[in-house]
Image: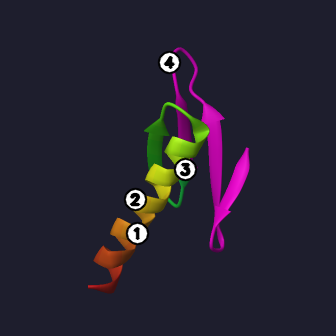
Amino acid sequence: MLNKIGHLKVEIFKIKNRSGFAAVCFEHLTEGKTPQEAYARMVKALRRSNRKLVS
């Protein structure tokens, strides 16, 4: 499943041999129990890394 955050593509997939989903985008990996949770965590991670790049 592909989503977008701005111009960045976010790939969400089911993790094999584990319960939950993962999201990969721009050298970041996040996990969550649902695809929505993994996506929300990705948004938060990208916001944090963006602040580090600006500073």
The dot on residue 18 is 4
Mark 3 residue element: helix
**Residue 27 appears at what percent x and percent y?**
48, 56
Q: Which residue is mark 2?
A: 45
The residue located at (52%, 61%) in the rendering is 26
Badge 2: residue crowd in 10 Å (few <14, some 14–19, many ≥20): some
Give the residue type that dot 1 points to. Arg
Mark 1 residue element: helix
Q: Which residue is mark 3?
A: 39
In the rendered structure, does residue 47 fall within the stretch colored magenta? Answer: no
Badge 4: residue crowd in 10 Å (few <14, some 14–19, many ≥20): few
The dot on residue 47 is 1
- Rounded to the nearest angstrom, the CA distance separating label 2 from label 4 is 22 Å
**Residue 13 appears at what percent x and percent y?**
64, 36
Location of the N terminus (image quadrant): top right
Tag 4–tag 3 contact (CB < 8 Å): no
Range of residues picked out in magenta: 1-24
**Residue 7 appears at what percent x and percent y?**
66, 73
**Residue furthest bottom as drawn:** 54
Of the numbered discs 3 and 2, the one sitting upstream in the chain is: 3
